Image (cartoon, helix red, strand yellow):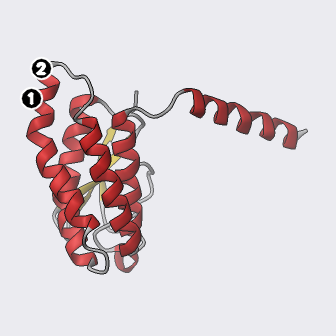
Amino acid sequence: MKTFILMIALTVTAISAYSNPPSKLDEVVIHYLHLKNALATDNTSEAARAGEQLQAALITLGTQTMSEAQKKAYSGISEDAEKNAGHISKSSGNIRHQREYFQSLSKDIYDLVKTFGAPQTLYQYYCPMVKASWLSEVKSIQNPYFGKSMQACGTIKETISGQ
């Protein structure tokens, strides 16, 4: 019986995901979290791939229909965010460089989420060692600035409710 219920739940989830494809902002957040998770596990090649996907999602987000106020807010964030994601994508093998650009990118993504709303519940963490924040989809600390060497370094600063 449990297997049957699990199969139904998985089917409903799959149908729901297919019929409600992620919005442009959802894609930005998905790729940002992919990047964060790659850095948290010291995976520089996966971080580069996520950076490339994030850069493309940011460019696509800019083509979305927005109000004048949203366009103004987005234009103030997008150029820097796209540049940072691009640097990360071209820095496979140089995790220090990727983490350096991730700091600024995290500020940009935070600003986007605060301006346009979070597609899901997100947690903003702060690393006192680096004096930088990041967003996460989970409550457990997965520090992208130190990866495996200091995985649990950080404190939660804000919970951002999803739509």
Q: How many marks?
A: 2
Residue 116 point in image, percent of width and height = 26, 29
Residue 3 point in image, percent of width and height = 86, 43
Q: Could you say which disc has been placed on residue 135 in the image?
A: none
| The N terminus sits in image quarter | top right
| Displayed quadrant of residue 5 | top right
Residue at the disc numbered 1: 72
Residue at horizontal 41 percent and vertical 47 percent from the top: 30
Element marked by disc 2: helix
In the visual, does 47 lie left or right of 97? right
| Displayed quadrant of residue 22 | top left
Q: Is residue 101 above or below residue 150?
A: above
Q: Amino acid at mark 1?
A: Lys
In the visual, does 66 lie left or right of 42? left
Q: Residues within 10 Å of mark 2 (few under 14, many from 20)?
A: few
Residue at horizontal 19 percent and vertical 51 percent from the top: 82
Element marked by disc 1: helix
